[in-house]
Image (tube, helix red, strand yellow):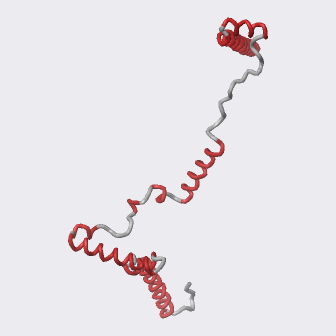
Amino acid sequence: MFDQKSTGSERKAFLVAILEDEQAEEEEQEVADDEALNDMIARNEEELELFQRMDLERAAREAMDPSLRHKPRLIQEDELPSWLLRDTEEVEQMAFEENEERLFGLGKRQRKEVDYSEALTEKQWVKALEDGTLEEVEETKKNRKKRKRKDIALLGEETKVKKEN
């Protein structure tokens, strides 16, 4: 920036240039008027004419009802959706979590219990079919198997406890 050899006039000229640059940037950041805004957003001449007509209609409405003048033309920060106000990192994290949940689910799936063995012998099945109690007999057989599995599981737990003691 400045060294021992720079003169006062050089320093002053440099600082003036910095201030002028800042003023130019501020002017660029100002809100555009209706015509400039229409030029920026119009994709063709027809849209430009449409936007200009809309501006004239808006001006006529504001002339009839002065309370409308206080409403800004551009969207305000409080009108934006909440996700637009968040940091990009926060939005990316939310999108990643949502995508991860969709891809991998919420955790371990519930296993379905399937029994491929036939619960009844052929004689038992024919007899139950003739008696009309096929569902009842099959259900009874399944319940016995379930109880047997539970008993085996409980027995296994008891042996684990005994080994630990």
The residue lying toward the viewer, choosing from 62 and 82, is: 62
The residue lying toward the viewer, choosing from 65 and 165, is: 65
Question: Residue 64: which quarter of the image?
Answer: bottom left
Please indicate, yes or no, whether residue 153 appears anywhere in the rendered image. Answer: yes
119 is higher (above) or lower (below) than 9: above
Q: Position of residue 153 (x, y in %)?
A: 72, 15
Q: Position of residue 105 (x, y in %)?
A: 63, 41
Which residue ends up furthest to the front in the rendered image? 130
| Point 72% across, 11% down: residue | 148
Q: Position of residue 67 (x, y in %)?
A: 22, 67
130 is higher (above) or lower (below) than 52: above
Q: How many marks?
A: 0
Question: Is residue 74 rendered to the left or right of residue 13?
Answer: left
113 is higher (above) or lower (below) than 87: above
| Point 70% across, 7% down: residue | 130
Question: Is residue 35 rendered to the left or right of residue 134?
Answer: left
Question: Residue 33: which quarter of the image?
Answer: bottom left
Question: Is residue 59 rendered to the left or right of residue 74?
Answer: left
| Point 61% across, 39% down: residue | 106
Please indicate, yes or no, whether residue 161 appears anywhere in the rendered image. Answer: no
Quadrant holding the C terminus: top right
Quadrant holding the N terminus: bottom right
| Point 40% across, 62% down: residue | 77
Q: Position of residue 145 (x, y in %)?
A: 72, 13
